[in-house]
Amino acid sequence: MGNTTSRVQNQLSQILPQPHGPDNARPFSDHEDREQFIHALLSLLRQCNLLNFDALTVKLLYSRRTDDRLVATLIVVDSVQDKIRAKVEPSEDGKDQAEAFLAFRRYVEVRLYELLQSVPEAGGGGKVQSAATGNGANVPVESPPSYDAAKDGTGGGAKTVPTSPANRPDSSLPLVGTFTTLTGIQESHIPSLWHHLHLQEHPTLMQYLPWPIPTSPSSLSTLLTHLITDRHFVLYAILADPSHVSLRPASPSPWPHPSCVGIIAYLDINTTHRTLEVGAVIFAPVLQRSIAATEAHYLLLRNAFSAELGYRRVAYKCATENVASRRAAERLGYVYEGRFRNHMIMHGVSRDSDWLSVVEEEWEGVRGALEEWLREGNFDEGGRQVRKLEEIRRERLGREG
């Protein structure tokens, strides 16, 4: 298998975009285009039994259309028969930084490695078939599940799920809680957000984010506009009463939420696979470690898993060294999945990223614990919690188990 892996990796190095070449424009407009390309590539590898690469030439070509759109085309040519074996042309819009290539390249490498691991060594167990390599050797290759097995969910432990797409989140529809309201960021929110962030005194609020630190309200507005228009984030302003982010006022709720004390967003939204990520989290000092902060995360999770949107997975990633961020996510109920090594180059420094998620099968338990923790009876008159969120979740899981 080692020679096979080496040949495949050599081909991979030829077809993946190079971050320092002339192609420093992102060839995929969104997550779905990227997934389409990866699926086509991995399907091709499996069809070729991962073994006949000596006879194939795989290239990723670029062309610019009349409307100035850059188009990436994957072409696989059979060198022996001199004909195209496969051609995939994902649509794209292509305006991004070179680090997007690095992230994409690493993503494909991880997926390819997983696929290679499914090819057992000679003499291994499982149902295998023999396939000839370019040098005449036979290597056992795992038989893919039959169509019927894949369809009914019996192949390889897979399960059948509805294929209807999720709906894209709409930030114009406010998400209203007791301590916070999340709504689409507007220009009118910028002065309040700038005032509460105190970025000049607290630049570490953006230490682990890949953007320059704004130096004025106008530069903050420019950054947020970029995230919405160019990166397709669904960005929310977190509105609250700074005097009551953990303390309930004497007057009955709901009470007004007049100030913008942070932002949070959905990103990497894939409606086909019904997955998205929560990120771009910037909490003003007054919001941090408050009931309102937990409620803001809860509102986003509840919205994503709602019947109206219908997502199956909500992801969260953070720099590996940002231990506080990972602990905060795990406290909320996110489950650690793994680490992307050398995932990004951020401010000239290599970054590893830790990935966590909540999936639909876990959501009921996560939601129940969050709602129980947020109840008024779980806090004393000073706004201090009576029971920790993790304690409540463990107890609920024990009862339900």
Image (cartoon, helix red, strand yellow):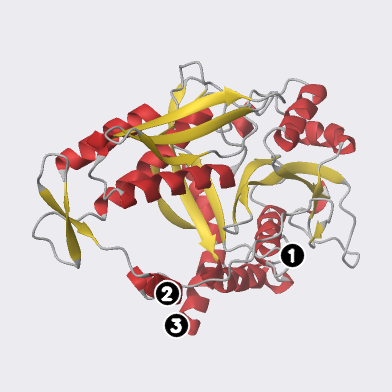
Mark-to-mark CA distance, 1 and 3 = 34 Å
Given this view, does label 1 or label 3 mark the residue nearer the observer? 3
Disc sitting over residue 346 in the figure: none
Answer with the quarter of the image where residue 307 lies. Answer: bottom right
| Residue that label 2 marks | 153
Disc sitting over residue 401 in the figure: 3
Q: Earlier in the sequence, mark 2 or mark 3?
A: 2
Residue drawn at 77 percent across, 22 percent down: 219
Q: Categorize mark 3 by other alpha carbons within 10 Å: few (<14), some (14-19), many (20+).
A: few
Residue drawn at 50 percent across, 83 percent down: 400
Work out whether 220 lies above or below 55.
above
Residue 344 image position (x, y, % from top left): 47, 31
The foreground one among 263 and 145 is: 145
Residue 25 image position (x, y, % from top left): 57, 24
Q: Is residue 7 left or right of residue 183?
A: left
Q: Amino acid at mark 3?
A: Gly
| Residue 248 seen in the current view | yes
Q: Is residue 125 left or right of residue 270?
A: left
